[in-house]
């Protein structure tokens, strides 16, 4: 586990993930993402991907990058995971907007991977924003987004489906999904036929 060796009062801690810690730069609309020492190679990759996505409205703009950090737009909003946890409605229009944003990334030669509920956000303005794009150049076919859309249609949109779930249950569903124990997984051939 990595801990910062110093702290700057202008940086507001916002969270951490598998590869980095994110701070909001006080008094700005920018975020500083500092990568752990064993993950610094991801900083360069993510910076290059944000450059390729530049100008697309559903992705943060890259402002600066270095050996172990990037500075991007601060996205004020809630992740889809938080929306499910708090009972905030996720409309079909927002799912379609996320789908179009991922298609726009593909048109720029990228292959969106590792798309999940914690890196798709609904902004305060009610728009979709996608963050954490470091794996958008992977060569493997990632079916996460197609599975999310399938689960949205088959379960979330039904009146009986709870629109609010506790964090522990959402995490359990995530673990079961990774172990392929849920009925939302579809084979690549089914997805191709659906498209």
Image: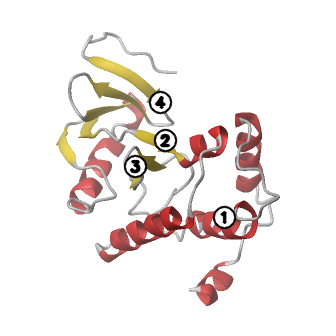
- Name the N-terminal-most of marks 3 and 1: 3
Regarding residue 20, the answer to whether it shows in the image is yes
**Which is nearer the eye, 126 or 168?**
126
Q: Which residue is mark 1?
A: 152
Task: Name the spot of residue 3 as percent of width and height, x first.
Answer: 44, 16
- Name the N-terminal-most of marks 4 and 3: 4
Of circles 3 and 1, which is in front? Answer: 1
- Name the N-terminal-most of marks 2 and 1: 2
Of circles 3 and 2, which is in front? Answer: 2
Q: Are marks 3 and 2 in contact (CB under 8 Å)?
A: no
- Quadrant position of residue 164: top right
Alpha carbon separation for disc pair 3 and 1: 20 Å
Q: Which residue is mark 4?
A: 16
Q: Which residue is mark 2?
A: 78
Q: Are marks 3 and 1 in contact (CB under 8 Å)?
A: no
Alpha carbon separation for disc pair 3 and 2: 12 Å
């Amino acid at each position: 586990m990595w801990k910062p060796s110093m702290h700057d009062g202008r940086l507001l801690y916002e969270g951490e993930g598998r590869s980095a810690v994110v701070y909001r730069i006080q008094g700005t609309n920018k975020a500083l993402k500092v990568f752990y020492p064993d993950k610094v190679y991801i900083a360069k990759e993510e910076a290059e991907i944000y450059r390729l996505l530049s100008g697309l409205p559903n992705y943060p703009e890259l402002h600066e990058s270095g050996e172990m950090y990037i500075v991007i737009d601060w996205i004020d909003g809630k992740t889809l995971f938080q929306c499910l946890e708090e009972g905030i409605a996720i409309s079909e229009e927002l799912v379609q907007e996320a789908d179009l944003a991922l298609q726009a990334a593909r048109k720029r030669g990228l292959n969106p991977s590792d798309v999940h509920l914690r890196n798709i956000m609904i902004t305060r303005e009610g728009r979709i924003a996608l963050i954490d794009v470091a794996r958008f150049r992977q060569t493997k076919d990632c079916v996460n987004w197609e599975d999310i859309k399938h689960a949205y249609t088959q379960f979330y949109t039904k009146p009986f489906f709870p629109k609010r779930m506790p964090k522990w249950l959402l995490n359990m569903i995530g673990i079961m999904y990774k172990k392929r124990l849920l009925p939302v997984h579809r084979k690549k051939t089914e997805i191709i036929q659906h498209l």
